[in-house]
Image (cartoon, helix red, strand yellow):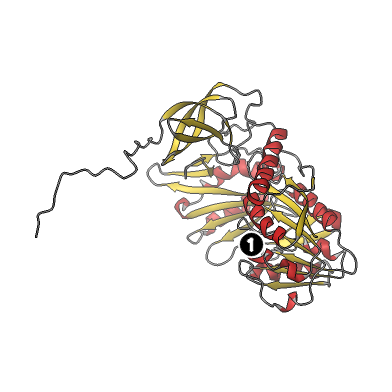
Amino acid sequence: MAKPVRGLRFQPSGGSRAAQIPVGKKQRLTIERLANDGRGIAFLEGRTWFVAGALAGEEVEARVLGAHGKVVEARTERVFSASDLRRPAPCAHAGRCGGCSVQHLPHDEQLALKQRMLAEQLSRVAGVEPEAWAAPLSGPEFGYRRRARVAVRWDAKAKKLEVGFRAAGSQDIVAIDECPVLVQPLQPIMSRLPAMLQRLSKPQALGHVELFSGSAIAVLLRHMAPLSAADLEILQAFCAFHGAQLWLHGEGEPQPVDPDQALGYRLEPWNLQLAYRPGDFVQVNAGVNEAMVAQALEWLAPQADERVLDLFCGLGNFALPLAQNVREVVAVEGVATMVARAAENAASNNLHNTRFFQADLSQPLSDAEWAREGFSAVLLDPPRDGAFEVVRKLASLGAKRLVYVSCNPATLARDTVELVRQGYRLKRAGILDMFPQTAHVEAMALFEAS
């Protein structure tokens, strides 16, 4: 057998490989424009830099968070030449906490950025523009978030419990004593939470904490080992002081310590009360949620004699207000527990013209019994993956009007291509500012059959 040849160096066919940029390196950059996620874009030595916290036209010093081929991700460490649009970050934790990435932009500029993101996706992917743009739906830019997950981790080396939110670009935890986007009832809980958790006897067994504010305030603790009686007493006293329910999540599903307690939220314009449990999906921005439901009903224009389909119905956030206006609502959801909860919500609100079904909506619509009679109108509110398999069959249901609520403009644009192919026209579209201070875009689009 021939001896192996050692010591040779073979160059890749594409030429010499550029040296990788190390994490932590600082680089002076000139920002050319903003990316769709609100980060600044710069170009240097054949690489594209995405810089969090930077604005177009600025000269900044950026610290590298990671590099992949010709793409470098970084965050702003220092601004040498500031944009006229830049404002002082309202939050003391800006740049470290990973939650609010565009708070250095005034709120009206945040809305303009989100509007551009939606328009660019519809134009570039679907090649369409709505016949009319709707004004952005927005509310207060701070104090809007009624639900939050707080990270909790025991640092064995430092023998310290870390409590806060995840840092930008890492799994580090930033200690937070005040969060400007939380609703006011959760602020005192947030500020006193770390000290309370540090009193517990087994901090290494703590998972995370979730805070809720709706028709009641609640604190949910995830724990990986049974709680002692003394720990439970500390938790109960803390929640009693703040007028909050205590929920525990050990093995199985989250449960309230007091089994008679329940969580929920109101849709005030429709005099509706919806129950939910930790783990259920609810919109975190109550004001914009109500405005969104109202706009969806206005655009869909449901009539008293119509049968309407609500896809990805969740707890009934759209289905129940719709049911007050039409002959029948058929609501479909993929998660069986949510289907049961939605049905209970309809019954508790004395709405008996609703029917709820469980179905895997990531798959093509089959010949389900609930689809055979057809529908006058359809409303869908899918997750970030969109609803491609569903929209492929919508024309066969006979719907003349369709409202699509999206949390991802990219998949909305993709699904728009299919809807246009089926003969629908994009009549109206606009953004929903569900998450101020972030670059996250929610949108609503109205389609009508040609």
The residue closer to the viewer here, 414 or 219, is 414
Of residues 199 and 92, the one nearer the viewer is: 92
Name the spot of residue 139 as percent of width and height, x first. 76, 42
Q: Residue at x 76, y 59 (%)?
A: 424
Question: In the drawing, does residue 421 fall left or right of residue 273?
Answer: left
Quarter placement of the N terminus: bottom left
Residue 321 as seen in the image, left or right of residue 143: right
Q: Is residue 388 above or below residue 20?
A: below
x then y, percent, for residue 419: 71, 60
Judged left or right of residue 157, residue 1 is left
Q: Quadrant of residue 364?
A: bottom right
Q: Residue furthest top?
A: 81
How far from the left and from the top, in percent, is residue 220?
A: 60, 55
Picture quarter with the C terminus = bottom right
User: In the picture shown, does residue 125 fall above or below 359?
Assistant: above
**Observer able to see residue 343:** no
- In the rendered view, would you say 332 is above or below 199? below
Q: Which residue is mark 1?
A: 388
